[in-house]
Every structure is written in structure tokens, then in C-alpha cells.
Amino acid sequence: MRIIVLRTFWLLIALSFCFSCVKVVKSDSMMMEARKMIETAKEEKAEVYAPDHLEMCQKELSRAQQALEDGNSSRAVGWARRAMVDAELAALIAKSKRLKKEMVSMGGNESN
Amino acid sequence: MKRHFYILVVISLLFACAKNGALNDVRQVLEKARNSEKVKKYSQMKLDDAELAYSKAKGSHHPDDIYVAKRKAEIALFYADAQETQENYLKAKNSYDEKLASQKKEKEEEIARLKDELAEKDRLLQEREEEWAKARSELEDAMKGLGEVKQEDRGLVLYISDILFDFDKSTLKKGAIDGLIKVAEKLGEFPNYKLKVEGHTDSIGSEQYNQKLSDARASTVSEFLIGHGVGADRVTTYGFGESAPRATNDTEAGRQLNRRVEIIVEHNK
């Protein structure tokens, strides 16, 4: 009986360790995705056309990083997810505005 | 104890309302995306993604899920806008490139036309220069025995000395006629040049008299030229009297030079 209790105890310890590892890996991977998306937004000139959105997603990414350093993996995942969607939005807004401006400079129609 | 229980219930209710409010915002944005024709055309996949995120948010009520669901619904809207803009941009760019190509072609054609025009002008100029050189050479030959030929700013000047007229007369000497015929014939061969016939005298006699004499002599030469094949519309006649001497009137040699008729062949530049 005692052996069973001991085994169960170590099994639970191992499982919780694995679970925490998975959380850290997940947050790392999400932060990487968020960084990529921020780069994409910058390529679309979000610094010029969607500066507020870009700043927001950069702050969210910093918070994710901070949460990870504090050992709060689930919070890190949360901030990284927010950073990802905000960066995607910044990229789309910037792309749309940039193309519209280029159309105006070509003498085209800005409105859609 | 009871009071704490009620406070907890109220806080829970407020919290639940706040979450429902946030979910309601998501629902509104999602509804907008669902009803958008642009989204149907360009970003159905993004809309499906937003629907999934909304379902997850409804189930979990987690603030991150709600936030992400709202953003995904917005992404569906902005993705459609960006796609449509890109489509319009490509159309505009094609049209702009075509316009530029057409303008470039027009400019190249214009340059080619101008080059042709320039080449033609150069050719005509060359022809004219050759003709002018020929006229000069042939007139120099024809003028032998009558006087000299000089290239001046006003044109090619044929200085015909006083051998044309007897003293105080304005009728041509018989001996000078043959030479003047040669000159007239040569001038007739080059019809592109305007001619000025100028009469000049020395200072012997009154100014008025000399003026009349120079007018008469210039007219005689003009009429002679016209009578021998030179177009009347090419010829203008002037009498200068004694006002434009070539040399001093104090010596016989100088006076001889001053008694003259000048035919100026004007170079059309």
C-alpha cells in the first residue's frame, strides 16, 4: 500500500513537471509567432500607418516576456496570444493604408 | 456572515455582467463581419477562425479568449479590406504602368520625329550652303571685268565699277552690257536669293543731283536684270547719292571707287 502511495506521488510529481514544461514551450512558441507577426507588421510599415496598434502589440509581447520570467507561463501565453492578434491587425491596417496611399500617388482612386 | 455572502453574490454578478458585456462587444463585431459582403468574398477563412474563437470565449469566459475573439472578428473585417485594396491597387498599378509605357512610347516617337526634322533641316542647310558657295564662285567668274565680289555681313556684294555708265549719264554703256548680261543670267540661276541694287556717286556736283543720278543708275541696272531673267519680286532698288563713299573723294582714284553700283545678294539664313 505504501509503495503504491509512493509511486502515485512520484507519478504526480512527474506529470506536473511535464505539464509546466508544456506550458513554457507553448508560451515560447507563441511569443516567437508574435515576434514574427510584429516583423510582418513592420514590413508593412505599421510604424507609419498603424503606430498605436504596433505599440500595443509590442507592449503585450513585453508583458508576455515578463510573465515568463516571473514563472507565470499561462499568463505569458495569454499576453503572447493578444500580441499575435494585435500584430496581425496592425499589419492589415498598415497594408491597407499604405496601398491606398500608393494608389493616390499613382493618380488612382483611394476609396474602395 | 450573511452580509459577506451577499457581497460575494453581488461581486460575482457584477463580474459576470462585465464578461457578458465584453462578449456582447465580440458578438457585435462578429455580426458586422458576418453581414459584410466584402468578408464573404475575401476573408471567409478568417471569419471561420473568428467564429471558433468566439465559441471558445463563450465557453471559457476567459478575458484573454474574449479579447482574442474580438480581435479575430476585427481581423476578418480588416483582412477583407486589405485584400480588396490590394486588388484595386494591382488594377491601378497595371493601368498606371500602361499609361507610363504609352507616355514613354509617345516621347520616343516625338524624339524620333524631332531627330528626323533636325536631319532634314541639316540636309537643307547643307544644300543651301553648297548652293551659296556655287553661286559665289559662279558670280565671281561672271563679274570678271566688271568689278569685284566680296562676302560681307549683308550678303555677297558685287561691286560694279564706273565702267557701266558714261559721265553724268544713267544709260548703260554698250561695252558693259555683255558683262552685265552674264551677271544677270547667273543671278537668274539662283532664284532663292533676294537682291538689292544700290547706286552710288562721287561728291562732284550737288547732293540732290547726285541722289537723282544714283537713283536713276540703280533703276537702270535693276530693270536690266529684270529684263534678263531675274524675278522682279526679288529686286529692290536704292539710290544713295554721295552719302556712302567707299574711298576718299579727294583723289581721282578714290572718286572712281565711289562711282559704282552694288548688287547685294542676300543670304537666306
Image (spheres, coloured by chain):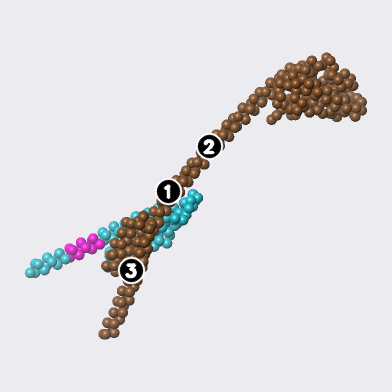
Chain colours: A cyan, B brown
Q: Is residue A18 magenta?
A: yes
Element marked by disc 1: helix
Would residue A105 be found to the left or right of residue B34 on screen?
A: right
Magenta stretch prevailing secondary structure: helix
**Residue B254 or residue B191, whichever sits in front:** B191
Element marked by disc 2: helix
Q: Position of residue B236 (x, y in %)?
A: 79, 28
Residue on which the image places disc 1: B90
Q: Position of residue B153 (x, y in %)?
A: 74, 29
The reply to whether the C-beta atoms of the residues labelled 1 and 3 are less than 8 Å apart is no
How much space separates mark 2 and mark 3, taking CA atoms?
Answer: 63 Å
Which residue is at 59% across, 32% downward?
B117
Which portion, as a residue range, is magenta? A13-23
Parent chain of label 2: B
Q: Is residue B55 visible?
A: yes
Question: Who comes first in sequence, dot 1 or dot 3?
Answer: 3
Q: Amino acid at mark 3?
A: Leu
Which residue is at 47% across, 43% downward?
B98
> Is the N terminus of chain B in the top left, top right, bottom left or bottom right quadrant?
bottom left
Residue on which the image places disc 2: B108
